[in-house]
Amino acid sequence: MNPINKFTSSRLHNLLGSTRKSRIISASAIFLAVCAFGAAGVAPLAPDASDLPVKTIAQDIQLPDLSSQITALQQQEATQKYVHEEKIRAGDTLATLLNRLGVEDDAAENFIKKDKTARAIMQLRSGKRVQAQTDEDGNLLWLKATVVDGKDNPVKNIMVSRSGDAAFTAEETAAKLERRVEMRSREITSTLYAATDSSSDGSSLPDSIVAQIIEMFSTNIDFRSDLKRGDRFNVVYETFWQDGEFVRAGRILAGEFTNKGTTYQSVWFEDPQTKSGGGYFSFDGKSLKKAFLKSPLEFSRISSGFGMRSHPISGNWKQHKGTDFAAATGTPIRAAGDGVIDFAGVQGGYGNVVVIKHWANYSTAYAHMSRFANGMKKGAKVSQGDVIGYVGTTGWSTGAHLHYEFRVAGEAKDPGKLNITAQAPLTTAELARFKSVAGDMIHRFALLRPNDKTSTLAAK
């Protein structure tokens, strides 16, 4: 072996050996230290408690005055107030109602009978809610109820309050309703009405909403024969509440009905800025409302159509430029379409006549009225179906009837032969606002659908 390599190898061996010895010695030292630490125990980090000086602190604790607490409780019980709620029953008198409300207060009963404002409580219909607060002796503290109109819409709230030992006051305030938007989804298993009754979630659709569903989709669906098991509908509608109590349902805001795989959709839109629109539209912004009513009278018959005829007074053979609807005097006459009053007054042989100017160059005339409805003056806005007057026999007329004319650019035309666009289209600005409303309803429908499968869409 080379002497240099031999020396290097020996030197490396000695270094490695000494390093190993160092590790063994170090480890042994640590082990012995741990053992010594364990044998000696853990040194205390704080002085022994027995070596600390003892201090005694004396403090008087005042016990509660039980007699004052008992007195306060007795006073609270003496002024205890009770709130009762009842609904008006058929045959109720004021006395029987107050008795069920826990009121034993002759002064209060006499006040309600005699006060002009408070007496309205005695005229509430069955089912209406009345609330009262009394003390433990049955003395009335306050009583409140809501008065409704003929359509069951809240009109005002009546509040009777005790203002002294035996003095009362009655106050009426306008009813304040809370508007809510509700969504429902149903599947047809037998009939539409069965589907709208209470479901698994305990909810049912108001009858007025069901009627609107039928009206909304009846031009496409015959609800007596077309419904199939598995058909579905989704509806978004408004309801009105007062003090947490359901008052009435409002308008359907959007609806879709899937029948035989085809989905029909409709959304209500009234422009918030121009207050125009006011009808149902397809989701692409096309109006679903018929342009004009087929008849301005709800129940009538055509007694003379558009065309040539013998004039009933002159006997001359001439063209009849309108349609006559036979009806009893006083029958309400409805506006055939949206528009503004262009004329309301007496006009020759027409007698009492109203002329309505519609969009584009369309107008309609209603003659021989017995009288006009309130508010009929030039420039007044009317909506389709509004009552504008009543059937009569004024002017050149031989009997009670309505003479109805449909005019284009001022010239009488036969409406049965015209292809009239449904309604004036939305303007660019109105369409932009409509898309915002429609987008919200599309999102709501997506939440109501059981899955993401889509079916063929069709306009109503």
Image (tube, helix red, strand yellow):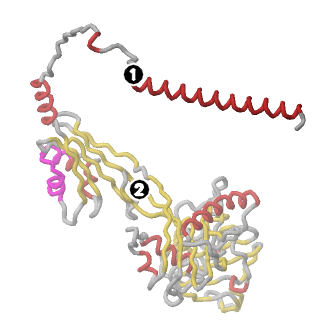
Between 108 and 190, the residue placed more toward the observer is 190
Looking at the rendered structure, the secondary structure element under dot 1 is: helix
Q: Which residue is mark 1?
A: 40
Q: Dot 2: within a 10 Å radius of its alpha carbon, few (fewer than 14), some, or many (20 or more) residues?
A: some
Q: Position of residue 119 (x, y in %)?
A: 25, 51
The label nearer to you, 1 versus 2, is 1
Between 169 and 356, the residue placed more toward the observer is 169
In the rendered view, does 357 fall on the left or right side of 246? right
Using the image, tell me which numbered label, if any, was put on residue 241: 2
Q: Position of residue 393 (x, y in %)?
A: 54, 78
In the rendered view, does 428 fall on the left or right side of 134? right
Q: Position of residue 280 (x, y in %)?
A: 61, 69
Q: Of callouts 1 and 2, which one flags the residue occurring earlier in the amino acid sequence? A: 1
Using the image, tell me which numbered label, if any, was put on residue 447: none
Disc 1/disc 2 C-alpha distance (Å): 81 Å
Please say if the residues under marks 1 and 2 sit with CB atoms less than 8 Å apart. Answer: no
Between 400 and 278, the residue placed more toward the observer is 278
Quarter of the rendering occupied by the N terminus: top right
300 in magenta: no
Q: Which residues are magenta?
A: 93-111
Looking at the rendered structure, the secondary structure element under dot 2 is: strand
Amino acid beneath label 2: Trp
Identified at 65% across, 62% down, the residue is: 439
